[in-house]
Every structure is written in C-alpha cells, then in structure tokens.
Amino acid sequence: MPTRGRTETTDHPPIYPVRAATKAKLKGEKWALYELVVRRFMATLAPAAEVRVQDAVFDINGERFLSHGESLLSEGWYRYYPYIKFRGKRIPELKEGQDVPVLGIDVKEDETKPPPRYTQASLLKEMERLGLGTKSTRHEIIQKLYDRKYITGKSIRPTKTAISLVQSLAEHAKNITEPEMTATLEKDMGKIAEGMRTFEDVVKESRDMLETVTKQIKKEKESIGGAISKASDEENTLGKCPECGKDIRIRKGKNGRFAGCSGYPNCKVVYPLPYSGKIEPTGRHCDVCGAPVIRIIHGREREERCINPACKTNEGRGVVGKCPLCGGDLVIRRSKRGKRFLGCSNYPACGNTYPLPQRGKLEFPGETCPACGAPIVIVITRGKRPWKFCVNPLCPGKEKKEKGSE
C-alpha cells in the first residue's frame, strides 16, 4: 500500500511509471526525469525507514547539556530514493547515572543569523502551510514570479520592482499582500467539493472581496503605478551615458532587448544586448570609451565586459578560431534559449555554426581538426576526465573512427 500524505486531492492524478525504460531509449534530461518519477513512485510503496533516536542529558556542575543522536536501523524507502540522504549522527551507548569525562569546554561567540532565503522547494512548503494555491498550481505561481521578473536566483531574491510593488500595496491596499484572502478562497472551493458550502455563496463572497480590492487599487493607482515605474527604472539602469550623462537602461524592442539612453530622442545612444542571460550593472564604466561595464550571467558562468561592442576592450573577445568555410572568426554565442554554440563573425554572409556542450567548462587549445579544419575543444566537468574532441558533428574524421571501431 502506498504511503499517504496529510491531505488527499482528487482533482489531479499523480504522475506514475507505466513502462520500463532504459538509458539507451531516454537520454539526458529525459532519463533523469523518468528516473526521478520511478524512484519517487517506488519510494511511496517501500516500507518505512526505521530510525533509532537517542537523547542524552548531561549534568555538569548543575548546568544541563543536551545531546541528540539518530542511527538508521532499516533503510526502507531511502534505498529507492537517493535524492534524500539520511543525515543523522549516532552517539555512543550511555547508561543512566554514568560518569562521562569532560575533555574541554569551549565558549563560542556568534551573532544571530537571518533565516535562510527561500528556495523553490521551501517556498512550495510555505505556500502549502499558508493554504495558497493547490498542488497543481503552486509551481505555476512561482514560475510566473520568475517570468515577470519579481524574483530571481535559485536562492530566491525579490527584485526592486517586487519590493516596490509589495510596499505600495501594503500602504494602499494591505489586504492584497496578506495570505488570508487567497487562502480563504482556496478553502471555500474545498468546502464546495465537500458539500459544506454552495457554489453560488462562494462566488458571491469572492466577487465582493475582489470588488473591494479593485476599488482600493483604482483609488490609489497613480501612487502605486508611480512607485513601481520608479523601481523598474532603477532596476533596469546599467550606468551613465558617455555622451549626455543620463541613464542607460534596458529596453525591449521587436528584435529583443537592448540598452538605450533615457535621454532619447535628444540622445540616440544604443547598445545591443545578448539574447539570453541575466544582465547586471557593475557600477563601473569603461576606461577606454566611457560606456557602462555590465555583468552577464548564464547559470554559473559570469562575464564582465564593456557594453559597447565597438570598444577596443571587446576586440577578439570570445574568438576561439577561424571558420573553415570563409576564414572569419568563430565566436562563442548564445541562442534566445541560452544555448551556447560557435558562430561565424561574418553572419549572415556565412551561416556556419557548431553546437557546443551545454555543461562544463570549455577550453580551446588553439588546435584545428586535421580532417575538417574546425576547432578542437576541451570540456572539463567535475568528477570526469577532460573530454577533447572536434566541434564539427559532421566531421569526416569521426566517421572513420566509428568504422574503425566496428
């Protein structure tokens, strides 16, 4: 019999395995997701883990000291679900009244630390505790916060826009920022399913609540909108314009984002920005051209450079070799989805591209493949040997190796 959680939902069936699969059929992220679902399913059917809990109280000159220990007697579901590790520490066997030698006394001075920032997992638990959303909607709510630039990072941080929005609403329409209103609506919908309330009553109550909120927002819309607009401008400011001294801000156009002077149309300074990645200001300006220096973040990769692509400091940046088709420079680029690849600097005249591994540190030793002339790359990942290969997936040299191995 499967283990049961604290609550039971009937609106959405769980995801469960229906057929055995192998790594040969499912590769990469598909296999990782499949294995996660299967192991979670097996863990719910596995016996409970058995843990021995040990608590000891020591009396040292009238002062009480506590020690807590845990030891695993039976693995149970831990055997099938390695993503959660047992972290208990065992303490020695002790008897009541036993004398224990004190080896030393250390007095540690420390300061009160703030609570850790939410992760997506801990935020989901907090939303469940507060009754916000359902199992099927909570992750969508968090994703919308990321999409609308209200939060950022794995260790979740609110953006300036989000802070300004909450502060404005707390001042002008406080009940929107409290969890009680949303939690009440969720509970009422549950009561409809249980037959404790009627659909009509809940709809009427919801409309009354939303009507009150709407009136509050409309009344203070200029104050709320002004505060949010100001915070958004501050968050999108990358530095000062080298021409007129006004702010250079992130803008959005038909072809994606770019950086432009806030003094437009009097000042028409603009700079292109990468298709993907997070852009952060560094607070510094280029010593050569005076344009802002920005920080570009792709996961764990961080790069600082002058925002001006024509600046001398950007010459040769990202170039790893020569294009074997036209002789132009092969440069590391990012797609709109953040995927890295090699592209020719003579694009669109030359559309030559090569895919790159999406994980691991890349090194280019300056070597070219003798079979096709494409660059040689070395990929370095943790716990594995460096992988050296030609970036051209259609390299004729690879076909010869495969035939030779056969």
Image (cartoon, rainbow, N blue to C red):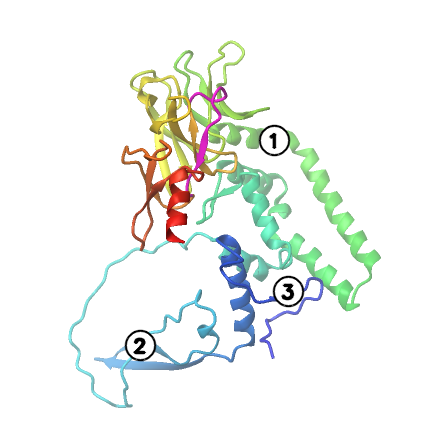
- State which region is magenta: 345-357
10 Å crowding of disc 3: few (<14), some (14-19), many (20+)? few
Q: Element at badge 3?
A: loop
Q: Are marks 3 and 1 in contact (CB under 8 Å)?
A: no
Tell me if residue 104 comes above or below residue 248 in the rendering: below
Tell me the chief SS of the magenta region. loop
Kindly report the distance in space between the C-alpha atoms of the residues bearing marks 2 and 1.
54 Å
- Circles 2 and 3: CB distance less than 8 Å? no
Residue that label 3 marks = 14
Q: Position of residue 63 (x, y in %)?
A: 26, 77
> The residue under label 1 is which amino acid type?
Gly
Crowd around label 2: few <14 · some 14–19 · many ≥20 (10 Å): few
Side of 107 where 137 appears, left or right: right
SS at circle 2: strand
Q: Which residue position is annotated with label 1?
A: 225
Q: Quadrant of the N terminus?
A: bottom right
Q: Position of residue 53 (x, y in %)?
A: 39, 81
Give me the residue at 39% from left, 38% from top: 391
Say which of 15 and 86 sits in front: 15
Tell me the residue that label 2 is attached to.
Answer: 67
Q: Earlier in the sequence, mark 3 or mark 1?
A: 3
Disc 1 crowd rating (10 Å Cα; few below 14, some 14-19, many 20+) is some
- Residue 106 falls inside the magenta stretch: no
Q: Nearer the viewer, residue 393 or 108?
A: 393
